[in-house]
Amino acid sequence: MRRMIAVLSSIMIISNIALAAGPGSAGNAEAGHQFWTKQYTQNSEIRSCASCHTANPRQSGKHVRTGKSINPLSPAVNTLSLTDPKKIEKWFRRNCKWTLGRECTADEKSDVLAFLKSF
Amino acid sequence: MKTTLFSFSALALLGILIIGGGVAMSDSEREPGHEDDDRWEHLQRRSTGVALTTSPLYQEECGSCHMTYPAGLLPVASWRRIMANLDDHFGDNAELDAQTAMQISDYLADNAADTSKYRRSKQMMSAISQSPDQAPMRITENAYFKREHDEISARVIKQSGAASLSHCNACHQRAEQGSFNEHEIWIKGIGRYDD
C-alpha cells in the first residue's frame, strides 16, 4: 500500500512538472497581471504588453506605431480571443521579442494566459 | 364624400404604382447589371488606383497590425526585401513561419507594381530612378508619392488622426480596396479635400 502511494505521488509530481513546463499549464493569474504591466526598455522606448493592449484586457487596444485598433484579448468580451493555439504562439513570439527583447518563457506565457482568461 | 375620398385614394395609389413602375423601369435601363458594376469599379480603379488585394492570407497576417498595402504600390525587389526582414519590420517584430512568409512574399511579388497596368502602379514605377532592385522599401519615399503629397502639412496629418502619411486610409477612404480616387479623399476635421 505504502509503495502504491509513493508511486502514485511520484506520478502526480512528474505530471505536475510536465504541466508547468507545457503551454497548457494552469498558470498564475496574479503573476500574469504583474507581467502584463511590467515595463521594459527597448530601443530607448518603454514597452509593456499594456503599451498596445492597454492595462485592461477587456478594452480595445491600439497599435502604438500604426494606430490600428486591436480587439480586446479577454475572452469574456471577445469570444474569438485565445481560441487558436497557433495564433497564440505566433503573437507571443512576435510581441515578446518586441517588448522584452527575447521570447517569453513557458511560465510567463501560461501566467499571461491565466490572467487574460480570468479577467 | 366617402366615395370621393376612396376613389381619390385609389387614383393616388394607382399613380404611385405607375410612377414607381416607371422609375423602376428606367432604373433597370440606366443601371448596368451587377457584373457591369464590377466592371465599372474595375475600370475606375485601373485609372485612379492600384489592383485590389486578393490574398486573404496577406490580409490576415499583415492587416492585423496595419493597413493592407496593395501589392501594386511597390516593386518586386522591395517586397522581397521587406519579407526577408520581418524580424525587424520598420522597428517592429513581424515574424511569420517560413511557409506563410513565402506564400505572402510570392503573392506580393506576383502582384507588384513592376508589371501592373494600373495607373498608380505605373506612376510609382516611373518615379523610381534607380534600378527597381534599389527601390526604397517605404512607399512614402517614392518620388511620385512625395510629389502627390507635398501640399499635405504636418497640421493636416495631425488633424486626420494619422501617425504619418503611411496611414493611407486616414484620408483615402477606399485605399484598402486599391482606390486612390481624389474624390474619395475625406479627412477628419476637414471633410472632403479637393486637390
Image (cartoon, grey):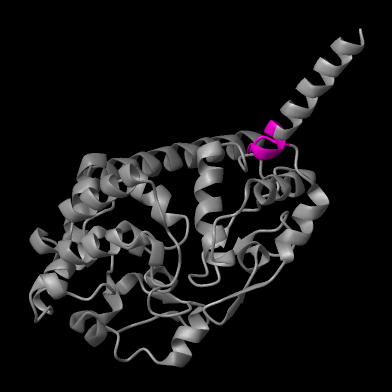
Horizontally, residue B76 falls left or right of residue A109, namely left
Q: Nearer the viewer, residue A76 or B23?
A: A76
Quick one: which residue is furthest to the top in this view? A1
Magenta stretch: give its range: A18-25
Horizontally, residue B2 falls left or right of residue B152, namely right
Q: Nearer the viewer, residue B47 or B37?
A: B47
B26 versus B114 height, above or below: above
- Can you see residue A119? no
Tell me what residue is drawn at x 29 percent, y 74 percent: B138
A3 versus B114 height, above or below: above
Tell me what residue is drawn at x 11 percent, y 71 percent: B132
Count of labels in the image: 0
- Can you see residue B142? yes
- Rendering quarter of residue A55: bottom right
- Rendering quarter of residue B195: bottom left
Residue A23 among those drawn in magenta: yes
Image coordinates of residue A53 in percent, x first then y, are: 64, 61
Q: Nearer the viewer, residue B101 or B177?
A: B101
Quick one: which residue is furthest to the front in this view? A3
Image coordinates of residue A13 in percent, x first then y, are: 79, 28
- Rendering quarter of residue B81: bottom left
Q: Nearer the viewer, residue B185 or A8?
A: A8
Tell me what residue is drawn at x 24 percent, y 47 percent: B38
